[in-house]
Amino acid sequence: MKALQAGVAAAVLLSGGGLAQAADLPLKAAGVTYVRQCTAEGAGFYYIPGTDTCLRVGGYLYAEGYFNTYSNYPAVNDKTYSIATAGVILDARTATDYGTLRSFMEARFRWRTADPWSDGPNAAEVDLRQAFIQFAGFTFGHLESFFSYYANANVLGTDPATIGDDTKINLIAYTMEFGNGFSGTLSLEDAAFRAAGVNSYDPTLPDTLENYQGGSQVPDIVANFRNDGSWGTFQLSGALHQVRGLDLFDTLNSTSSWGYALQGGVMFKLPAIAEGDTLYLQTAYTSGATSYLGLINPSGAFAPPDALQSGTGLSLISGWNVTAQFLHNWSPTWNSAIFGGYAQWDINNSVAEATYGASGGRNANVGANLVWTPVANLIIGVQYDYTRYAATNYVQTDYGLPTQSVNAHRGLVYFERDF
């Protein structure tokens, strides 16, 4: 009888509250295992529940303190300023029959107390650093120009003072993989962002405009060819840039010409010196495409345009640069980068050389940093750089540099936490 009663009691539990609890168990178990790691895409990726999309959520925090000064420093400018930055990264990837569909976003929320070599005021900034879609070899959105190569690798800071192209830009591109690490890319990029302006060859003329830049009509056409191997990487880059200038005497009309930029860069891995050591070498030549030089001008005066407009048409500004950077790992937690560059540009117009008081300009910079990584994903660093911007064959006029050269020094204390 007791055995019968026990059986009845067990049946009641199973058919009542016991059954309800048992029915909950599969839901709880599913909740535990539903968000699972996406191992195919690497560490940090997890499946979005209910989809085949893998998502990585990351970010970083920067804290930076700058000391900066240049010759003839204006009294109203701040010699010290600071920047605090919070960055958010979202990387979503979905496997398809045509390869991986990737959507990437990097946004920065920044508070700065001044601009480089300038005055305040304090300002909050939102910087959409990158936002792009990649699918079947195509790239659409805002990211690093496919012309860029060295792009300030291993240089610290939100405001790096380094010669060379490091440009985030809107673009549409297609990349083809050839095998053995070789690839090629053709990209249409925002020409308006690359426009450096068109100046009058003779600013003493009556009713001279500050800028004769015409509106862009076609995007910049950019291409590169590169190889990524165990020894390092190299890249050859080229760009076509349309220059449009308003007519000096009838600004309803315009003339146009094609400028261009060529660049070659190589990075060597140097494990014989220390594991992780690298050396970058890069050079570029431009004609009518000044923004691709990546000049550093602390004073902001006597900045070269893409071209000069004269009565006979556009006279293109030409220039070239060389850059180098060496990264050395002293130990697993200490490393240093030494970097530098030189650039030169020419006016190529005798009337303009007389009125602007120079045949062109020269730009040089050098710097170094020391970085400590006491624990994973925490960086503490210090950095110094020196910049010189000068006029070639200088004669003082009302339209050139106020002095023959401007010399700038800058120090940086830097903290970074990645997650």
Image (spheres, rainbow, N blue to C red):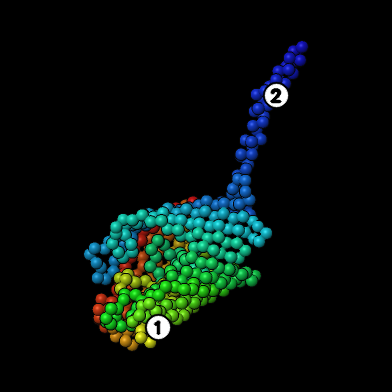
Say whether residue 207 is visible: yes
- Disc 1, SS: strand
Whether residues under marks 2 and 1 lie with C-beta atoms below 8 angstroms apart, the answer is no
Residue 278, image x, y percentages: 50, 68
Indicate the amino acid at tag 1: Leu
Q: Quadrant of residue 18?
A: top right
- Left or right position of 182 against 264: right
Q: Which residue is mark 2?
A: 14
- Nearest to the observer: residue 206 or residue 315: 206
How far apart are labels 2 and 1 at the CA level?
A: 90 Å
Residue 151, image x, y percentages: 46, 68
Q: Would you place residue 52 above or below residue 153 in this image? A: above
Say whether residue 378 is visible: no
**Mark 2 or mark 1: which is in front?**
1
Residue 129, image x, y percentages: 46, 60
Residue at 47 percent of width and 66 percent of height: 169
- Disc 2, SS: helix
- Left or right position of 296 against 399: right
The disc, 2 or 1, on the residue closer to the chain's N-terminal end is: 2
- Nearest to the observer: residue 149 or residue 324: 149
Residue at 31 percent of width and 76 percent of height: 209
- Nearest to the observer: residue 13 or residue 155: 13
Q: Would you place residue 59 above or below residue 247 in this image? A: above
Residue 332, image x, y percentages: 49, 58
Q: Which residue is mark 1?
A: 314
Q: Classify mark 1: residues with Cα within 10 Å, few (<14), some (14-19) or many (20+).
A: many
Residue at 34 percent of width and 70 percent of height: 386
Indicate the amino acid at tag 2: Leu
Q: Classify mark 2: residues with Cα within 10 Å, few (<14), some (14-19) or many (20+).
A: some
Residue at 43 percent of width and 70 percent of height: 192
